[in-house]
Image (cartoon, helix red, strand yellow):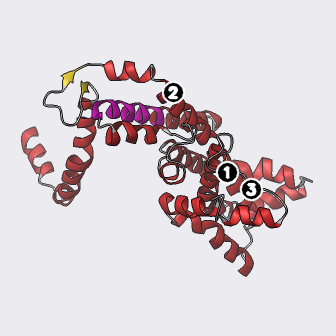
Amino acid sequence: MTTATLTGRRWLNPAYVYLAPSLLIIAVFIAEPILRSGWMSLHDWTVGEETHEWVGLGNYLELFADERFRNALTVTGVYTLVTVAGQVVAGLALAMWLRRTTWLSSLLRSAFFFPTVASFAVVGVVWKFLLDPQVGLVNAWLEKAGMTGPGWLSDTSLALVTVMGVGIWKGVGFSMIVLLAALQGVPDQLIEAAKLDGAGRWQQFRAVILPELRPALLFTTVIATVTSLQLFDLVYVMTGGGPLFHTESIVAYLYQRGFVEFRLGYASAIAWVLFVLILVVSMIQLRIARNHDGG
C-alpha cells in the first residue's frame, strides 16, 4: 500500500469530520483576526481613510517612544504584581483556614467564592457605587466612626490601590478553591509522619504541605497573571483610566487608540506587544517552576 493511499485514508478518519466545524470556527473567528491584526499593525491603518500606508515597524517604534504607553505598561505591571501576590497568598491562607469541612466552612467558602462568579464589569459597578464619596456606603460607615472618607477613585494616590484591592477581592475565591482542592489531596500520612518527627505547624506547612501544593500554586499564579495583564473592565467601569491616567492599563489604552481615535494599526501593535508580554511572562513562570522541581 502506497504512502499516498495511507495519507488519504488517514484524512478520511471520522474524527476529522467531527473536528471540522470547530476547526472552521477557530480559523474564521480566532486565527484569521489574529493574522489580520498582525498585518494591520504594520500599516498606518485608520478608520475612514481610503489608503493604509505601509509603515513596517513604525507603529512599534512610535509605541515604545509613547510616554502614555509606558505609563500604561507601568500601571499594568504594578497591578499584576500586587493582585497576583494578593490573590495567591490570601487564597492559600483561606484554603488552610477552611480546609476542614463543616457547615460554617462550607458557608464561608461559598461567600468567598461568590465574587469569582460575577463579571468584572458587575464588580466594578458595585464597588464604584460603594466607594462613591457622596452616596457610597463605605464613606458613610467611616463618617459614623468619626472619620472622613477619601475620594477613593478620584485621588491620584488612592485610585490604583483601590482598583487593586477590588481585583484581589474578585480573584481570591478562585485561588482559594483551587488550593483547597489541592490541600485535600495531601496525604494525611505525610503530615502524621512529620508530627511524629517533632515538626511544628510551620515546619509541617513548609516541608510537607507547600511542596504538595506547588502544581496548584503554579496554576493559580499563571491564570491570575494572564487575567491581570488583560486588565480592562474594572478600570473602564470604575475610573475610566483616571485620574490623570493613574489607572490606565494597556488594554484601556488600546481601547482608547483603537475604538475612540480609530487608529486600528496602532491599536493592533499594542495588542501584539501585550500578547508577547503575556507569552514571555507565562514561559518564565513555567521555566522557574520546572527548574525548582528539578526538571
**Which contiguous range is marked in magenta?**
263-278
State how far apart marks 2 and 3 are (Cα). Answer: 32 Å
Nearest the camera: 165 or 126? 126
Q: Quadrant of residue 66?
A: top left
Q: Furthest-right residue in view?
A: 198
Quadrant in the picture for the N terminus? top left
Instruction: State left or right for residue 3 relative to residue 219.
Output: left
Q: Look at the magenta stretch and give its main secondary structure.
A: helix
| Front position in the image: 89 or 216 | 89
Q: Which residue is mark 1?
A: 151
Residue at numbered disc 2: 70
Task: Give the alpha-carbon distance from disc 2 to disc 1, as whole Å.
Answer: 26 Å
Estimate the x, y position of residue 57 in percent, counting from the top left.
Answer: 31, 19
Q: Amino acid at mark 1?
A: Gly
Question: Residue extending furthest front?
Answer: 134
Q: Which of the two marks, 2 or 1, is nearer to us in this view? A: 1
- Badge 3 is on which residue? 149
User: Comparing marks 2 and 3, which lies closer to the viewer?
Assistant: 3
Instruction: Inspect this view and state whether residue 187 appears.
Output: no
